[in-house]
Image (cartoon, rainbow, N blue to C red):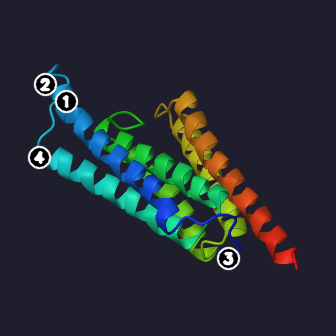
């Protein structure tokens, strides 16, 4: 992740870090706020703990990526991929995507995440390889929908399209970061 265009560290990075962690804290408080007005939202301590751990993991991962590179395209790619993964996991835990949250077919989405994680590790988190890993993740997401359709499990085409679009957007951002890195490497 060499070849940075702008520094994400130092004092200039502090507002973004505060914003990321502040938004996470507000998101964690939303269910508590909603519980004051409706009985539709009924979270217990375990729900808040799981949600908080997921937010801390996503924000911590983003923080590591932001510190590792100054490329805004790379950081945006990480942010989009983390948001997609976060939403995918949370939806599966909360209500399930295929049927309800107890349907074992939802475990296929763990494979989608595994494709992205393993691909990122193989790419050693370099932007060009990350782009490829996220394209593979988008294909895995689409494959789950195809399997669910063939098996008659039911799925949501719009939801699949939403996640595929997020994975491909992230891939595109990583490709932009790779081009930036290549240009900086070619400059004298």
Q: Residue furthest front?
A: 11
Q: Which of the labelled discs sits on residue 33, or is there none?
A: 1
Give the quadrant of the N terminus. Answer: bottom right
Q: At x 68% / y 69%, what residue is drawn?
A: 4
Along the line of sight, which residue is nearer the eye, 84 or 26?
26
| Residue at left offset 56%, top offset 74% | 121
Q: Earlier in the sequence, mark 4 or mark 1?
A: 1
Q: SS of the residue at dot 3?
A: loop
**What residue is drawn where x is 15% and y is 37%?**
43
47 vs 98: above or below:
below
Left or right of residue 2: residue 35: left
Q: Is residue 93 left or right of residue 179?
A: left
The answer to whether one can see residue 128 in this image is: yes
Q: Which of marks 4 and 3 is nearer the N terminus?
A: 3
Q: Is residue 135 visible?
A: no
Q: Name the residue under label 3.
A: 2
- Residue 89 percent across, percent down from the top left: 39, 48
In front of the other: label 4 or label 2?
A: 2
Mark pair 2, 1: CA separation: 6 Å
Q: Mark 1 vs mark 3: which is more N-terminal?
A: 3
Q: Name the residue under label 2.
A: 36
**Dot 3 alpha-carbon crowd within 10 angstroms: few under 14, some 14 to 19, many 20 or more:** some
- In front: label 2 or label 3: 3
Give the numbered dot on residue 45. Answer: 4
Earlier in the chain: of badge 2 and badge 3, it is 3
Q: How far apart are marks 4 and 2 (CA)?
A: 15 Å
Few, some or many residues within 10 Å of mark 1 (<14, 14–19, 20+): few
């Amino acid at each position: 992740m060499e070849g940075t265009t702008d520094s994400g560290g130092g004092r200039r990075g502090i507002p973004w870090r505060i914003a990321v962690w502040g938004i996470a804290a507000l998101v964690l408080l939303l269910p508590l706020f909603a519980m004051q007005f409706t009985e539709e939202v009924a979270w217990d301590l375990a729900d808040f703990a799981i949600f908080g751990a997921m937010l801390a993991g996503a924000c911590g991962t983003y923080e590591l990526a932001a510190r590792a590179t100054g490329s805004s395209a790379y950081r945006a790619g990480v942010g989009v991929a983390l948001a997609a993964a976060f939403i995918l996991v949370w939806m599966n835990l909360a209500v399930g995507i295929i049927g309800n949250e107890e349907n074992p077919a939802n475990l296929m989405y763990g494979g989608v995440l595994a494709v992205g994680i393993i691909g990122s590790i193989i790419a050693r988190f370099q932007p060009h390889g990350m782009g490829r890993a996220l394209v593979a993740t988008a294909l895995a997401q689409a494959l789950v929908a195809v399997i669910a359709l063939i098996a008659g499990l039911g799925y949501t085409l719009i939801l699949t399209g939403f996640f595929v679009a997020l994975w491909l957007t992230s891939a595109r951002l990583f490709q932009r970061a790779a081009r930036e890195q290549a240009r900086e490497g070619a400059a004298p």
